[in-house]
């Protein structure tokens, strides 16, 4: 039986937004993130992190640095009772300084490649799933992958008017979003997303 997933952007949603985080000592979880992930896990959602990592293509850190930070993130979460089902990342950039990462790929958000890969690998039901991000590109990737609902949070980048208009809801943080989803959030009858900040 196909299961729903929570697709979660990393920087600015799960951890505090800092330019090109790539060292464990700079990785700080957003307050409430652990509780949000636990609630989703208990509710039967697969937990999938999807993150653009153009810092690799820009030569700011190595792919090995990213992988080491991901291992740190996973082990830190597991120590708190949270197991991620998948972590997908895109190291590419069409105009990358490093030639090996200079790729116009299908995985870099707003394209849906990372989500589609996880959907197939984990037998996810996209229409029953939702995505949480902090940029328009997150919402666009979710829509392109057929994800049922796409939300934004205010803990990352400043949200554009277009991003907020395209999202199904705008929340103060991941925990506020997850609580609403698990309380059977339903779209408002009138146009425009709810703003739960």
Image: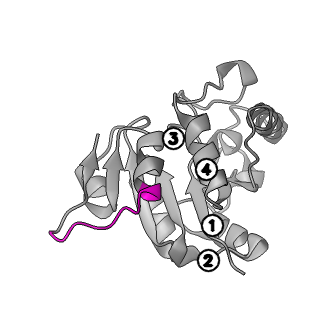
Label 2, on which residue? 125
Per the image, label 3 sits on a secondary structure element best described as: loop
Label 1, on which residue? 115
Residue 89 percent across, percent down from the top left: 69, 53
Q: Say which residue appears at 78% left-offset and 39% top-offset.
A: 74
N-terminal of the pair, mark 3 or mark 2, is: 3
Dot 3 alpha-carbon crowd within 10 angstroms: few under 14, some 14 to 19, many 20 or more: many
Q: CA distance from mark 4 to mark 2?
A: 23 Å
Label 3, on which residue? 13
N-terminal of the pair, mark 3 or mark 4, is: 3
Residue 52: mark: 4
Q: CA distance from mark 2 to mark 1?
A: 11 Å
Residue 135 visible at all: no
Q: Say which residue appears at 75% left-offset and 38% top-offset.
A: 81
Is the residue 117 above or below the residue 44 in the image? below
Residue 118 visible at all: yes
Q: Quick check: marks 1 and 3 in contact, CB under 8 Å?
A: no
Q: Quick check: marks 3 and 4 in contact, CB under 8 Å?
A: no
N-terminal of the pair, mark 4 or mark 2, is: 4
Q: Nearer the viewer, mark 3 or mark 4?
A: 3
Please give left or right for residue 86 compared with residue 173 in the image: right
Is the residue 82 above or below the residue 194 in the image? above
Q: Nearer the viewer, mark 3 or mark 2?
A: 2
| Residue in front for this viewpoint, 134 or 39 | 39
| Range drawn in magenta | 181-190
């Amino acid at each position: 039986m196909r299961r729903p997933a929570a697709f979660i952007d990393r920087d600015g949603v799960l951890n505090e937004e800092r330019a090109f985080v790539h060292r464990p000592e700079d990785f700080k979880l957003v307050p409430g993130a652990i509780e949000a992930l636990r609630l989703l896990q208990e509710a039967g959602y697969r937990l999938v992190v999807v993150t653009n990592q153009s810092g690799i293509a820009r030569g700011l850190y190595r792919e090995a640095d990213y992988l080491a930070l991901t291992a740190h993130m996973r082990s830190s979460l597991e120590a708190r009772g949270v197991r991620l089902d998948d972590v997908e990342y895109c190291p590419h950039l069409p105009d990358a300084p490093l030639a090996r990462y200079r790729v116009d790929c299908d995985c870099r958000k707003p394209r849906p490649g990372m989500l589609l890969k996880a959907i197939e690998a984990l037998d996810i039901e996209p229409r029953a799933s939702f995505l949480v991000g902090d940029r328009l590109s997150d919402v666009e990737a979710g829509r392109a992958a057929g994800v049922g609902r796409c939300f934004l949070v205010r803990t990352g980048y400043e949200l554009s008017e277009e991003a907020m208009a395209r999202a199904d809801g705008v929340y103060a943080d991941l925990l506020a979003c997850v609580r609403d989803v698990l309380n059977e959030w339903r779209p408002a009858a009138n146009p425009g997303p709810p703003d739960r900040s």
